[in-house]
Amino acid sequence: MDSLSNLWYNLPISYKKEDYYDEAFRFTLSWHGTDWLAAAGLSLLSASDVSAASYPSEVLLGTFWESDNNTTDTVYWSTDGVNFYELSEAYTDATPNDPSTSWIAGTPYNVSTLHDPSIIYKDGYFYMLSGFSQNNRIIPMIGSSKDLVHWSYPNSGSRTNVGVTTTPAGSEKYGSTWDMVAPDFMVDDDGTVWIVVSLGYYASWHNDSSQNDIMQPYLIKATGLKPGADPASDPGAQPIVSYSNAVPINLPQYDSSHTVTNRIDGSLYKEGNYYYFSVKKDGVTNEIWRTTNLSLDAVQNTSNWELVTDDAVTGFEGPSLTKYNGTYYMYTDKLKDYPPENADGKAGVYVSVASTATTGALDSFTGWLEQNQFKIIAHSANGGTKECRHGTVITVKDSNAIKTIWDRRAQTRYNNTSGTSDTPALASTGWYNKESFKASYYGGFLCNYWYEGNVRQGLTGRGKEIYDPASDAWYWLDSNADGKMAVSKDVYQPYTIQGQDEIGKWVRYDEYGHMIKGEDHRHIEGTADDAEWGYWYFDQTTGAMLYGLQTVTTTNAGTGESQTKTVYYDDTTGLLLKGYHTISDTLYFFDPYTGEVINGWYADPDTGVLYWYENSARQGYNVNNPDYRGKEIYDPTTDAWYWLDNVQQGAVAKSKDVYQESYAGRFADGEDGTGKWVRYDQWGKMIKGWDWGALDNNGIHQYFDEDTGAMAKGDVWIGDEHWSFDWNTGYGTRLN
């Protein structure tokens, strides 16, 4: 039977794990010529001059898909853990601009790319894995390659595929047909291939919130794995492999106050006698467990599992753990909607770095910290960069595998194809990475320098601002750091306009050195990582930090919708103000969540007292002037006048008489027509006309002018009635 006829085992349907989040985070950095290779501390090799002595002893090998729209699976190498360089596109999305399909380009039939791909090396071949479930059967999808160029079409290699020994929980809520997501595999010392999958109910596929997943990790034993044929000559040949049934991995419930029912994205890493199992729990937090006995029976026994850490990293998914040159690296995919109140809508693969444990294993974690976390940079073979999403990174030590990787690397643009030199040539103009990540990452960042005419810039004065047209971004070269590109830094830039005094601006450069334009948010300096985020805004043209009252346009990270709002940025720090603030003797109140200015009536969140605001400035209240009496305002919504009383910190006056030195018409106290007593009722509205509630002991009323609200005094005709009102009390007597 030929290889194509065997494909009836696996129905050609699209199997795509939907994320909790929306659009991916994209970063582009310009690398000129071959200079970026120095970032890895490597010399250039010609394709014809590769000797055994040139091969490294360890290489990181990773595979990731690109984005929600483009599910292309790319294979990368790295020697620094942050910069990953393309070896090949194993499976190219045929419709990269259509998120609804993920068929592989160039196949004679429909077969999907590998979502959340995993990679291993075994017996001379590289293998990639993903899969899906159908009719309560697990269908692993495995592709293979000998040279990292020619890949077989993914196939399970089994007529029956994989069953389960224990039905996943959750059927009472979501029905009898369960889901499978994020398979990952590992090669044991004896050649056994272990596959970890998560089974249960992926809530978003059942019209429910993604936070309501009910998932449990399972283990499958795959034996005898080998290609059905050389993928270069017969890519349709199905792999040769046999699978056990999937058994549940039963982890202890270590938190007595909370039963974990959602564990997903598991992966295995072995060091010494320990198998380390990394997995995401409750949608956001990544745990690490370990056992010395990885067997189908042992993993079901909770007593065989030991918790290493309950929080390696939070806010990420898809953990992949490895150890490279004595340092631990955990690769995870950033969650777009975490934290819920401050989500930035950005995804992408990050690496968290931990220093070597004191015991020689993962017992002691001394480095899983935010400052030791970096977004990886995936360099494409055409000289640009790629987006990266949930995948796997392994450390390759097999000499034959390393030779294959290094020989493939020599065939890409990372090689000096001119054949004139094995030394990286310095770019005449552009970026040059003098030091490797390994040598410099504990300082926090990669060491990027900018050269013009072979001369490093930014060495004199305070530094230099430069524009890189390839990345369409401005950068600051810091003279205090020998011209190094400034990252995550505020810089004051003085400048003059002809004929004017010196002016200047504060600008900010992000973690990639780009001058920020538009809204920026981060943890407020000096606060804990879980503290409130602060917001700033930088001019879209000049990058200057904005201050004071500003109308800005921002983009909602979750929906992508733009919104225009008026806010206030601190006059000194530029921080977006929220809640109460005193500015120039005036009390301001800004929306406590969005910072938007408030106009009109607003009730104090704690007391419920009404105040009137104009551009968030509380009216009728001067913080430091006790002689200030207050302010009269008109509310067109109610068509009424109100008094804001300074004595009451600007609260609206109710059931109160107030003397106002303003126009009073016929009842004015002064010869200039000003000066009047007015009255505000129980709702705070100025009374006009008869106040029927104001009676003296004889039932005599008071009257307030219909136009000015001034209390009537003296002899007055009201309509066809003649009245006399007391000049002091305003009480009236009808004369006719």
Image: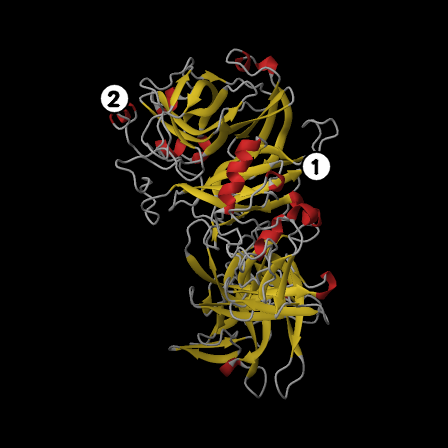
* 197 w.r.t. 284: above or below: above
Q: Mark number for residue 66?
A: none
Q: Is residue 699 left or right of residue 152?
A: right
Quarter that holds the C terminus: bottom left
In the structure shown, which secondary structural element does the residue marked by tag 1 occupy? loop
Of the two numbered discs 2 and 1 on the same chain, state the one appearing first in sequence: 2
- The correct choice, above or below, for 652 with respect to 255 in the image is below
At label 2, which amino acid type do we have?
Met
Crowding around mark 2 (Cα neighbors within 10 Å: few <14, some 14 to 19, many 20+) is: few
Residue 355's tag is: 1
> Whole-percent x and y of residue 368?
66, 37
Amino acid at the residue labelled 1 = Ser
In the rendered image, the quadrant that contains the N terminus is: top left
* Pointer 1 local density, CA inside 10 Å: few below 14, some 14–19, many at least 20: some
Task: Residue 1: give its label.
Answer: 2
Using the image as rendered, state which of residue 132 and residue 718 is in the foreground: 132
Left or right of 157 on screen, residue 579: right
Residue 696, by quadrant, is bottom right
Quarter assignment of residue 561: bottom left
Q: Given this view, does label 2 or label 1 mark the residue nearer the observer?
A: 2
Observer-nearest residue: 416 or 355? 416
Circle 2 sits in a helix, a strand or a loop, which is it? loop
Q: Residue at x 57, y 30 (%)?
A: 398
